[in-house]
Image (tube, rainbow, N blue to C red):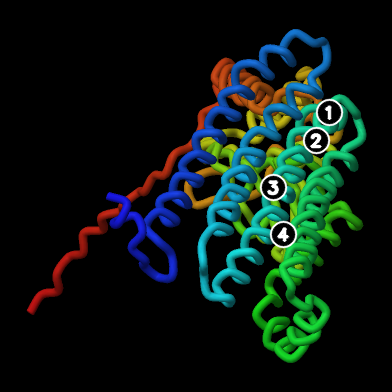
Amino acid sequence: MPEMLSNTYYNNTVLEWLTAMGIVLGVVLIARVVYRIFKTVFRKLTASTNTRLDDILVDMVEEPLVAMIVIAGIWLATQGLTLPDGLSTLIGHVMQFGIFMMVAWLLSRLIDSLFEEYLVPLTKSSENTLDDQLLPFLRKGLKMIIWCMAIIVGLNNAGYDVAALIAGLGIGGLALAMAAKDTVANIFGGFTILTDKPFSINDRVQVDGYDGTVTEIGIRSTRIKTLAGRIVTIPNSKFADSAVENVSWEPARKVTLELGLTYDTPPEDMEKGLQILQEIANEDEGVNEGSIIFFSGFGDFSMNITFIYYINKSSNIAATQNRVNLAVLKRFNAAGLEFAFPTQTLYNINATPKAQ
């Protein structure tokens, strides 16, 4: 047995390989124990306090901390092995870079939780919609800064010349700009939405064939919940290039109702119909003043009346339209006014054949 452990494979004895594997397994077990302690002991302690901040810290720290312990254990296991210089250096650089990535992950999780716990409720309780639009930009911007800083510092500590790397990227800058032109257009579109404010969160808009309520305005895209209840993600560049109709800004909802009466309706009854429609518009509390009612023409099957009215924004649009339609039906029937439907009259003319 001792002889087998002393056999050498890839510049290390079997005992040294087994020791390295044992260190890795041991560190994984320690990481699981630490994770279990956070789940049971620390969470119970934070649950007994009156503040939510310690609960957030414990919840966000546990997973990145466990990952850091595993990375540190792998690096420790490699220190007892004889590895080629290039491989040993590469492993060290990867481990250092991994630690910085875990720190960025931890900070990113903390920002998400703090925003969700403290800032999002504040923006929802305020009447101003500007903070609802700025919050996603600020949230994603901070996370982007953290990850960029972590990558730059991590590469620098791993032994790479970040300044030379960034300068080298300038060689392919034109190609990168061409490849990222859509992303840049979407980002500028996001700033256009923020500055011009064609709509805000919770506004109903119509754009590019979609009709729905704005739920989120991001750096690259905007999410709209359609009338069917589906979430549609639209690139921000669409809002800069397309016409956007903000339905929420309409002063009142315009409704156009076309009515057709039969051709045997006398002029007096036609005038009576116009008067009934005016009375309906005046009596309904959901309808604004300024309704337009007129005898609009002679159609193929009917004499037409056009009834244009406007529903208050504060009123229930569907309920108001339903009341008006029912009132029209009831009062026209009571007045004996008959609605027309498509008809055709065929005339059969018998021609006497000529004598031969």
Q: In front here: 134 or 249? A: 134
Element assignment for label 3: helix
Q: Residue 105 has which mark? A: 3
Task: Verify CB contact (< 8 Å) between mark 1 and mark 2.
Answer: yes
Q: Residue at x 21, y 64 (%)?
A: 351
Q: Which residue is mark 1?
A: 118
**Gap between marks 2 and 4 measured at Cα:** 20 Å
Rendered image quadrant of residue 292: top right
Foreground mark, 2 or 4, reads 2
Foreground mark, 3 or 2, reads 3
- Where is 334 relative to 273, above or below? above
Number of other residues with Cα within 10 Å of mark 1, as a class: few under 14, some 14 to 19, many 20 or more: few
Name the kind of residue labelled 3 in the image.
Trp
Element assignment for label 2: helix
- The image position of residue 46, as x and y in percent, is 74, 16
Q: Residue at x 63, y 59 (%)?
A: 95
Task: Verify CB contact (< 8 Å) between mark 2 and mark 4.
Answer: no
Name the kind of residue labelled 1 in the image.
Tyr
- The image position of residue 14, as x and y in percent, is 37, 57
Task: Verify CB contact (< 8 Å) between mark 3 and mark 4.
Answer: no
Q: Which residue is mark 4?
A: 220
**Gap between marks 1 and 3 measured at Cα:** 20 Å
Number of other residues with Cα within 10 Å of mark 2, as a class: few under 14, some 14 to 19, many 20 or more: some
Task: Verify CB contact (< 8 Å) between mark 3 and mark 2.
Answer: no
Foreground mark, 1 or 3, reads 3
- The image position of residue 302, as x and y in percent, is 52, 43
Q: Is residue 15 left or right of residue 230?
A: left
- First in sequence: mark 3 vs mark 4: 3
Q: Which residue is mark 2?
A: 115
